[in-house]
Image: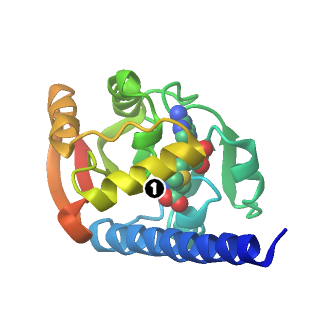
Amino acid sequence: MSKFTRYTISKFYDFAEKHYIRDYERALLVIRKNLVFNESDIILDIGGGTGFILQEIYKEAFMTINIDTSKNMLQQLKNKNIFKIQGDGTFLPFKNESISIVLLINVLHHIHEKNHKLLFQEISRILKKNGTFFIIDLHYPMTFMTKIYTRIEEFTLGKTYHIPSEKILEILNELSFTIKLVNFMGKNKWIYSIKAIKN
Ligand SMILES: C[S@@+](CC[C@H](N)C(=O)[O-])C[C@H]1O[C@@H](n2cnc3c(N)ncnc32)[C@H](O)[C@@H]1O
């Protein structure tokens, strides 16, 4: 490998590492600001990946569960107090009204848009009455930089499905969730968070 290639690759990963860590930290800050956990809570993190979020909050709940399609991501989560399930958010292996809080953090844009309603129906099914659904994701790319970001993500991870937060709110309203909060963050307000309560 030439010196130049090595330099370019290392710079790319320096950038990516910084970027992703900032994403995680921002997500955690937003969660801390908008959610309060209770010692009787059962928290489900759909697409929880390596368990970054649950590692930070598991001590505050009765039970925490990470369901993710990726075996490799789950393998990196070594904390025995957090349950790990390899599975798909659109088919949740839980009883009706059994979960207190569902987190969906930076996952929705990886799920085909034709399955978004199905995913939300599943979340509504397993959430307890008055249970909380909290989502953080990225809007449809509107600016030059967000379009570039999306292209790089699609090149490395496959097709993505960024859709406007208004569309998410439409589906949640259809499913009779009460919207408690809609917040926009980041440059160009590209990142949104929604807190919805199941009726
Ligand atoms: C960008 S990572 C986000 C990880 C974590 N939520 C966080 O914010 O730290 C997206 C995760 O979603 C998972 N994922 C994608 N589609 C999924 C699906 N249909 N069901 C469950 N997990 C899924 C991926 O395997 C990956 O771990």
* Image quadrant in which you'd find residue 131: top left
> In the shown orientation, is residue 139 left or right of residue 92?
left
* Image quadrant in which you'd find residue 116: top left
The amino acid type of the residue labelled 1 equals Asp
Q: Nearer the viewer, residue 145 or 132?
A: 145
Q: Residue at x 15, y 41 (%)?
A: 166
Q: How are the residues colored?
A: rainbow
Find residue 82 and report its horizontal and vertical position in percent.
66, 57
Find residue 98 and report its horizontal and vertical position in percent.
46, 37
Quadrant in the picture for the C terminus = top left
Q: Residue at x 39, y 73 (%)?
A: 26
Q: Residue at x 55, y 45 (%)?
A: 155
> In the shown orientation, is residue 176 left or right of residue 121?
left
Quadrant in the picture for the N terminus = bottom right
192 in relation to 110, above or below: below
> In the shown orientation, is residue 57 left or right of residue 189?
right
Q: Residue at x 58, y 66 (%)?
A: 52
Find residue 137 and report its horizontal and vertical position in percent.
34, 52
Q: Nearer the viewer, residue 136 or 163?
A: 163
74 in relation to 77, above or below: above
* Image quadrant in which you'd find residue 93: top right
Helix, strand or loop under label 1: loop
70 in relation to 143, above or below: above
34 in relation to 135, above or below: below
Find residue 198 and report its horizontal and vertical position in percent.
25, 39
Residue ID for mark 1: 41
